[in-house]
Amino acid sequence: MNQLRVILLAFLSPGQAFARILAKPRVIIALLLLWISAIAAHAVLCHKFDKEAMVRATAVELAEEEGGKEPPESDVQKEAVRRLNMKRIFGYVAIFMMIPLFAMGLAILFWFLCRFSKNKQGFKKCYSVAAHVWLPTAIRSGLALIVFLDYPSIDPLAAQGLFRTNLGDLLGRSSVIPGLFLVDPFLIWMGVLFGVAGRVAGWGWLKVICGGVGAWLVVGFSSRLLF
């Protein structure tokens, strides 16, 4: 129950939340929330996959591999189903593995910056802080789930980046102006949370700003692998 209060405070009053986390680090509920929200969004996405779109794409690819010869329909169907299943399975495995690994990356950054502070923090506390810094992605997954539900069907080959929140994707300029994907409210939110946690840990304002910007960049580039 206390962990749920801390998670709620992370959204409403992050300073209080991180003070409690540093006093008594807990991580499992935060990770579970991140896992559950991401898995729910991925499950809805998979449910909306357009099998016929995958069949058509598979038929074209197999025909190219056979030098233009049209493959048997049964082979196309089997290969399309296999590819769909692989996308589903890989998505779940990626969510299960990447969420704690991404938290680990932020935890290492927080721990490193704490090494040069008066109030040094153990790695367990740093990891708990990092897991809670990632919580805005749970909100993002919930919003993505709502967006996916609104689609009658989704092309499995065009599912990556379907829910767009960064400026680059919204303007369609990601390939033209590199770095626009970093202008994302959720990434900025996580950078701010990281800075707030650092301030609670006793960092000076210069380190808070540098740490927040560093975390924003870390989560920005990391999120490209997941979103």
Image (cartoon, grey):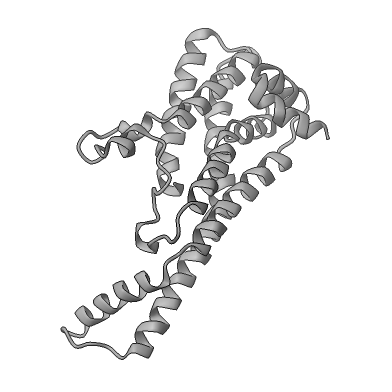
**Which residue is most to the right?**
1
Q: Position of residue 92 (x, y in %)?
A: 55, 59
152 over 113 or under it: above or below? below
**Which residue is most to the top?**
205
Residue 19 visible in rendering? yes
Quadrant containing the N terminus in the rendered view: top right
Q: Quadrant of residue 111?
A: top right
43 over 201 or under it: above or below? below
Q: Position of residue 160 (x, y in %)?
A: 39, 53
Q: Is residue 166 left or right of residue 103?
A: left
**Which residue is at 65% across, 15% downward?**
200
**Which residue is at 45% across, 17% downward?**
210
- How many marks the image carries: the answer is 0
Looking at the picture, tell me which residue is in the foreground, 20 or 177: 177
Q: Position of residue 37 (x, y in %)?
A: 61, 47
Q: Quadrant of residue 73?
A: bottom left
**Which residue is most to the left?**
67
Looking at the picture, tell me which residue is in the foreground, 181 or 140: 140
84 over 145 or under it: above or below? below
**Which residue is at 48% across, 51% downward?**
150
Residue 121 visible in rendering? no
Looking at the picture, tell me which residue is in the foreground, 103 or 51: 51
**Which residue is at 69% across, 34% downward?**
124
Q: Quadrant of residue 11?
A: top right
